[in-house]
Image: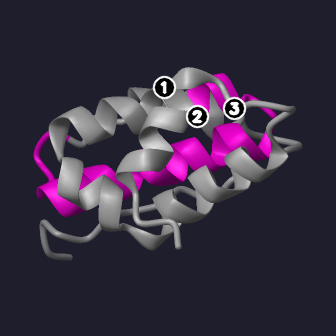
Amino acid sequence: MSHFTVCRPRWNSATSRSPLTSAPQVDVSALPTERRVRHVIELARAYSAWNRRDEALSVLLDAEQQAPEQVRHHIMSRQLVRTWVRQGQNKPQQQLADLASRLPLA
C-alpha cells in the first residue's frame, strides 16, 4: 500500500461508532493537501447528512483557510454549498452567503 492510499474503515451501525465520532480524530496531517481537503469535505458531507449543517459549514470553512483553491474548486464542496443555500430559509446565514460568493456555483 502506498503512503497516498487512504484506508476507510468499514462501518456497521449495529457494532461500531458513528463515522462522525471517529472521523474528526483521524490524523491526516501526513497526507497531501488534496487528500486532507477531501477528508474534510467528506466529513462535511457526513455532518450535513446528519442535519448538522453548522458543523459541516465550520469544517469546510476551516479547510478553506488551509487550502482555498482546493475547497473552492472541488465539485463536492460546491454541491454542498449549493444545497445549503437552496435549503436555507428566507436568507442564508452570513458565513454561508460569503462562502457561496467565493465558489463558482453556476
Sequence-wise, which precedes: disc 3 or disc 2? 2
Write down the quadrant of residue 32 in the picture: bottom left
Q: Position of residue 60 (x, y in %)?
A: 43, 38
Amino acid type at circle 3 is Pro
**Badge 3 vs badge 1, beta-carbon distance below 8 Å:** no
The residue tagged 3 is: 92
Q: Which mark is residue 56?
A: 2
Write down the quadrant of residue 59 in the picture: top left
Q: Secondary structure at mark 3?
A: loop
Task: Residue at 26%, 50% (x, y): give it.
Answer: 36
C-alpha span from label 3 to label 1: 14 Å
Read off the magenta span.
Answer: 29-56
**Badge 2 vs badge 1, beta-carbon distance below 8 Å:** yes
* Magenta segment, prevailing SS (helix, strand or loop): helix
Give left or right: position of 51 versus 83: right
Amino acid type at circle 1 is Ser
Q: Secondary structure at mark 1?
A: helix
Give left or right: position of 105 versus 28: right
C-alpha span from label 3 to label 2: 14 Å
The residue tagged 1 is: 58
Task: Residue at 50%, 62% (x, y): give it.
Answer: 78
Give left or right: position of 7 versus 51: left
Q: Secondary structure at mark 2?
A: helix
Quadrant of the drawing holding the N terminus: bottom left
Amino acid type at circle 2 is Ala
Q: Position of residue 48 (x, y in %)?
A: 71, 42
Q: Nearer the viewer, residue 20 or 10?
A: 20
Q: Position of residue 90 (x, y in %)?
A: 85, 32
Task: Residue at 28%, 40% (x, y): give it.
Answer: 64
Q: Which mark is residue 19?
A: none
